[in-house]
Image: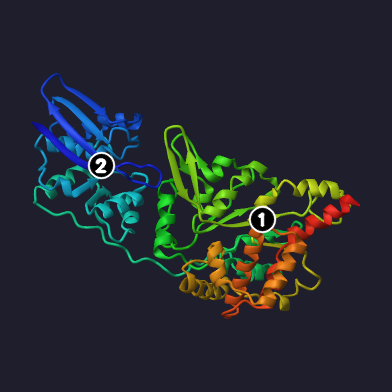
Amino acid sequence: MALSCVYSRARIGLDSPLVTVEVHLANGLPAFNIVGLPETSVKESKDRVRSAIINCGYEFPAKRITINLAPADLPKEGGRFDLPIAVGILAASEQLPQTDLSQYEFAGELALSGELRAIVGEIPVAMASSDSGRTLIIPTANAEQASWVKSAKIHAIDHLAQLYPHFAKQTTLPLTEVKTHVTEPVITDLDMADVIGQPLAKRALEISASGGHNLLLIGPPGTGKTMLASRLAGILPLMHENEALEAAAIQSISHQKINQHSWFTRPFRAPHHTASSAALVGGGSHPQPGEISLAHNGVLFLDELPEYERKVLDVLREPMESGEVTISRALQKQTFPARFQLVAAMNPSPTGFYNDKRSTPEQVLRYLNRLSGPFLDRIDIQIEVTRLPKGMWAEDNNLSESSATIQQRVSQCRAKQLSRQGKANALLGSREIKSYCPLSAENHEFLELAVEKLGLSTRAHHKILKIARTLADMANRDSIGHDDIIEALSYRAMDRILRHLTEAVTV
């Protein structure tokens, strides 16, 4: 019986479930059938595989060929199954030894000449094959990024013809070496030293980076909101290896190019305000990650916040709390990680200014009401960015700290949080807040009165405590002080603006 079994991997979101490629050669009229829920791109592999086998000098069996991709109820798509199908046919026709095939997994798209082309999602495949204890054989174009999974054993090949000498024990394919990971900050043109003035905004930016807090910048045009927000990624601490691997895996399944010299730098995504809900959270008949997943472990920047459709912003509410997004379709459901740090910028009125007399309080309030209360409640720090006062353009006043200097302080503060609780302050749960953000009786009473007077929610109460905890960490204090609470309460600019406008409209 001419039968062979080869292992490969499918791609379902960030998962790479095992696929067993069973090949059976039977007597009868020549035919080539693929079963096991293959999509069009997989069905077309029969022509690519036939040409590749012939052009590599092998004999294509003139038999009834049946390919079964098991499990049968798992959808299979893409050209990644070309290589395992070709290997299975060669093994079943005894043109390739079957002895060690069970120790390997194969993935790669074949050209008609037998050359291998890159596939999508090599990092999840490498992670899955490493967990299974098998060696992965993939195209050379995918080997570098797949090798970032340190525990994976990977052989990189350029051509189908390279397999026979390896399995026939004539030569041995070398294992792909793991390149040294670059952990130095990447130098960019976006430096905090370029920002003139705005000490309050810079302070808020450092607090946001130190504790992982969401941030909203409110101010008229030209005050540097976008400039400040675009520099947040440069002061964030570098990702740990597991975080970097998670972010790289998402990018690898999204056709995103990853730079090996900067893949430890946190991602920064800035979608346009015309982006749809599906573009932000992900979607499609075969769910793909959206901007919030591409910003996983990094920054999502939303400029001109009120210009986004309200329903688009409201779909961010659940991921902002849970750190993941679940996309449900009729045939399948996928969950993607989405632990991002939100930074948003907006004008305080439709005309861009507070008191230009071009809009009434009713019009301004209508403009700001494009942002729902529950969405704003999930933003920790809300500050006003004012116009520069006279004299700030003088050269003597333009001395400012560089991003590298600020990043050192941020990294030290974040390291303190990780050693104490294993996560950033912004990610603390309600029980953890009680453990790590204790207050004295006097400070507790003061905060309770402030929350009641300002009409804040329980979520806002918790966020104030988290910010105060970050402020204490930045000052290298073990306990939260009275000044920390007062400063944390001061970062509620939107509450003040809305309260003032509501009073004006009521009067």
Residue 235 drawn above or below residue 4? below
Residue type for callout 1? Asp
User: Which label lies toward us, 1 or 2?
Assistant: 1
Looking at the picture, the colour scheme in use is rainbow
Amino acid type of the residue tagged 2 in the rendering: Glu
- Disc 1 to disc 2, how far (Cα)? 55 Å
Residue under the point 66% across and 45% down: 308
Residue denoted by label 1: 377
Whether residue 441 sits left or right of residue 414 in the image: it is right
**Kind of element beneath mark 2:** loop
Q: Is there a contact, CB below 8 Å, between mark 1 and mark 2?
A: no
Outermost residue, right side: 507
Q: Nearer the viewer, residue 406 or 383?
A: 383
| On screen, residue 151 above or below 294 | below
Q: Which residue is mark 2?
A: 115
Residue 386 rendering spot, x and y as whole percentages: 76, 64
Q: Is residue 260 left or right of residue 69?
A: right
Residue 399 in view of the camera: no
Q: Residue 20: which numbered mark, if any? A: none
Residue 230 in the figure: left or right of residue 186: right
Quadrant of the snapshot with the N terminus: top left
Residue depicted at 61% across the width and 69% down the height: 207
Q: Position of residue 226 (x, y in %)?
A: 66, 58
Task: Tell me if residue 371 can be seen.
Answer: yes
Q: Earlier in the sequence, mark 1 or mark 2?
A: 2
Residue plotted at (21% across, 25% down)? 32
